[in-house]
């Protein structure tokens, strides 16, 4: 079966010790003996960041994962996740949106797709990124295999970012493995009233780095991968007000001051839709231009 599968374009079988085997994975405890890869082998050697979290995130969490992946992918990181619904899906899509590298590690044979709802996404990742599995062809998805898969997600990455996670989330396993492997662990804080913030808050109490913008992660990881990053911190410097070419952002920014204003109010006075304003505010927040306040209000970030 392996020989037949290997004849297809883009399919590879990489053994530990081969030049194509990822160096970081070779260093972890219980390193896999071989990897089935469908896609671009070069992505296995890029500086990588894992983005993981809940399978049932809030819409804000989903947008955050997407925008962090888009920003960090654009900065030269390969975005790694597990093709699950929720945060994993948002992270892969954010990387693809940026035209960046993304890798999905699978908890089953590479000739299967799970969940079925991500079949199209899996095909897109195989075409523009890479699908990877250590499990033999024909291996069916099984709950016991996913924690085993998680050590590869953290192991190939310089750091792991947890976006939203409940107190007993499997994402915390990935974060724990990252710490044991000597990798960086990042977590995004959230509302004390959101159950999906509790896992992240737990990680922060245990020493994970609290991050508020994508550049927080670039600052931490750039020294570890400066020779591979597309640019240094200077070239990923946040644009100043008025420097964007996008007219919608310039238009929206005219209505944001130091006095808090709600999304609904911004939509009403700007003529943009609520969805447009929400998405743009998230990007501006990630880039450190505005801050989110209580009651769904926003204001310019004081400098």
Image (cartoon, helix red, strand yellow):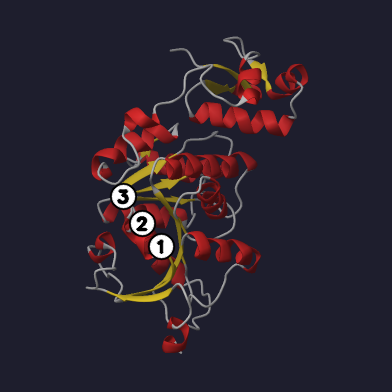
Task: Say whether marks 3 and 1 touch (CB < 8 Å).
Answer: no
Q: CA distance from mark 2 to mark 1?
A: 6 Å
Task: Say whether marks 3 and 2 touch (CB < 8 Å).
Answer: no
What residue does disc 3 label?
Answer: 158
Task: Say whether marks 2 and 1 touch (CB < 8 Å).
Answer: yes
What residue does disc 2 label?
Answer: 154
- Quarter of the figure with residue 254: top right
Judged from the image, the secondary structure of the residue bearing numbered disc 3 is loop
User: Horizontal and vertical percent for residue 7?
Assistant: 45, 83
User: Horizontal and vertical percent for residue 244?
Assistant: 54, 23
| Mark in front: 3 vs 2 | 3
Q: Residue at x 38, y 33 (%)?
A: 216
Q: How dense is the environment of label 3, judged by Cα within 10 Å: few (below 14), some, or many (20 and up)? A: many
Q: How dense is the environment of label 2, judged by Cα within 10 Å: few (below 14), some, or many (20 and up)? A: many
Q: Is residue 171 left or right of residue 123?
A: left
User: Horizontal and vertical percent for residue 242?
Assistant: 54, 16
In this view, the residue in front, 227 or 27, is 227
Q: Which mark is residue 150?
A: 1
Q: Residue at x 30, y 51 (%)?
A: 179
């Amino acid at each position: 079966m392996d020989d037949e599968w290997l004849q297809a374009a883009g399919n590879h079988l990489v053994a530990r010790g081969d030049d194509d085997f990822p160096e970081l994975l070779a260093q972890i405890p219980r390193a896999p003996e071989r990897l089935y890869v469908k896609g671009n082998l070069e992505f296995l050697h890029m500086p990588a960041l894992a983005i993981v979290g809940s399978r049932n995130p809030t819409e804000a969490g989903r947008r955050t994962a997407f925008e962090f992946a888009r920003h960090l992918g654009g900065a030269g990181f390969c975005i790694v996740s597990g093709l699950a619904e929720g945060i994993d899906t948002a992270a892969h899509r954010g990387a693809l949106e940026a035209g960046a590298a993304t890798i999905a590690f699978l908890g089953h044979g590479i000739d299967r797709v799970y969940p079925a709802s991500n079949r199209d996404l899996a095909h897109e990742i195989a075409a523009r990124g890479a699908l990877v599995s250590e499990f033999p062809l024909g291996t069916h998805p099984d709950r016991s295999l996913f924690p085993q898969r998680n050590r590869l997600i953290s192991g190939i990455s310089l750091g792991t970012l947890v976006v939203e996670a409940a107190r007993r989330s499997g994402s915390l396993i990935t974060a724990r493995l990252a710490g044991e492997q000597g990798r960086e662990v990042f977590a995004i804080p959230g509302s004390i009233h959101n159950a999906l913030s509790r896992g992240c808050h737990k990680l922060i109490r245990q020493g994970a780095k609290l991050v508020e913008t994508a550049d927080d992660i670039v600052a931490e990881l750039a020294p570890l991968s400066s020779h591979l990053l597309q640019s240094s911190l200077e070239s990923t410097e946040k644009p100043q007000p008025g420097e964007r070419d996008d007219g919608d952002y310039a238009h929206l920014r005219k209505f944001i001051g130091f006095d808090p204003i709600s999304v609904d109010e911004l939509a009403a006075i700007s003529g943009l839709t609520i969805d447009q304003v929400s998405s743009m505010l998230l990007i501006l927040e990630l880039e450190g231009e505005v801050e989110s306040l209580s009651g769904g209000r926003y204001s310019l970030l004081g400098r």
